[in-house]
Image (cartoon, rainbow, N blue to C red):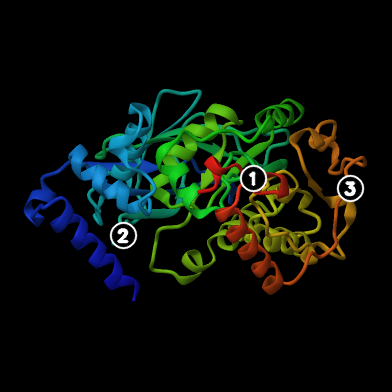
Amino acid sequence: MIYPNIWLKDFIVQHLIYKLSYGDVKKLPLKAQILPGYANWTDESWKLHLHGNVFYDAHLSNHTLDKWAHFLTLFQAKAWDLPRQERDHVRNTTQELITITAPSDSLGSLSISASNTSNPAILPVPSISYTGSFEGWVPLKGVDGLINGDDAGSKIQRVEMGLMLANDANATNFLVPEHGITVLSDVDDILRVGQIWRIFHMIRDVFVKDFSPWMNMPEIYQDMLAAMPDAHFHYLTTCPQFLARKYIQFLWSHYPVGSLDTHPWDFTHFAPIAFPRKFLLDRIFRTFPKRKFILVGDSSNQDVMIGYPELLRKHPDQVQCILMRNTTATEKSDWYKYSPKHFKGLDRSKFMFFKLPDDLKGIDFAHGGCVNSSVVTDLNDHGNPVTQGFKVLWWRILCHFTHAVDLGCPEKKDRK
């Protein structure tokens, strides 16, 4: 059913929203978004993982964008009633969502150059799917100024990339050596305030506002970078690819620059679509079998609560540390207590649940550290999913009809 759904989406966007014929669309310029990727060293050469999407550069009127934004936010955002800055956010996000995909092989070539040279190499582009997305591994042959990734003491290198026949299609990519430490981090509710357990609030937040860091977490990451200047930072979110630009702007403004993975958008394979986080985690571990990983996440994300312990069991020599934020300790509206059952039986020196960013201060990550001995990790189970579900339902009803802030309800203005 995937193919008909995609074709139906393209038909609706092209003909009913933009009101453009096939001929009109073909006259539009191409635009592309390349995500910052990583490269690994194999067979005496670098291979870069390239991924992004291609679409036609079409524009909707503000009136049309406002109507669709109201619908796409489940009627949480009335653009016409918002302050100017928030109204612009809503329109920009909606415009990036409602695009006409460009399943085409007419992008020309890639222009790639190392940061220490001005001579770009011209390389072929991976094939583009019918959804307008592209994903593949590009051998970086003929790129001047690159250092081998298996050399002793080799460090992270950067290459700048552009697509020859698409507008606004540039990205910085990271060449990651065989050995070293990768800090692999979830984003929502660990690096930024998201509250993904509150669906209406989350949707409105994504469309309307700038992302905000969670407390002083940027300071913690800058401390990590200072202690491990050669570390690779990789960020992973299962948000749709059309939001990647917003995530990149936020991350690179507050956290160490690094590569990014979003929800794969190639519907020709089942696993990346059905289990995106597992697929992305398994891929990066396969890509860097000799690197150590520090995994960072939060307890509100069930994929992480299951996936991180599984990785520690499968790759005990690679996983140096798992750092999990306990969201229920600081968020009144997160009533669903996490189940730590997947962490039971694991080496307690390799994982920690923490409440505040300051709990991570003083840990010597550069020399294998992971745990703050003054922070207690609670591994008690808090009930099965059924009883937890009833409890959440009860609190939602109570807080909807009362102002019981003293009992744990969020402020009325924050309840949506």
Q: Residue at x 24, y 43 (%)?
A: 65
Residue situated furthest right in the rendering = 373
* Secondary element type, mark 2: loop
Q: How many marks?
A: 3
In percent of width and height, residue 298 lies at 68, 50
Rendered image quadrant of residue 177: top right
* Secondary element type, mark 1: strand
Q: Residue at x 53, y 27 (%)?
A: 253
Which of discs 3 and 2 lies nearer the camera? The answer is: 3
Mark sitting on residue 185: 1
Give the camera-side residue of 324 and 79: 79
Among the two numbered marks 1 and 3 on one chain, the one whose residue lies closer to the N terminus:
1
Mark sitting on residue 234: none
* Secondary element type, mark 3: loop
Mark sitting on residue 131: 2
* Residue position for label 3: 376
Among the two numbered marks 3 and 2 on one chain, the one whose residue lies closer to the N terminus:
2
Q: Can residue 26 be seen here?
A: yes
Q: Can residue 291 be seen here?
A: no
**Mark 2 residue crowding within 10 angstroms, few (<14) / some (14–19) / many (20+):** many
**Mark 1 residue crowding within 10 angstroms, few (<14) / some (14–19) / many (20+):** many
Rendered image quadrant of residue 2: bottom left
Residue situated furthest bottom in the rendering = 1
The alpha-carbon separation of the residues under discs 1 and 3 comes to: 22 Å
In percent of width and height, residue 315 lies at 76, 60
In percent of width and height, residue 88 lies at 32, 32
Which residue type carries mark 3?
Val
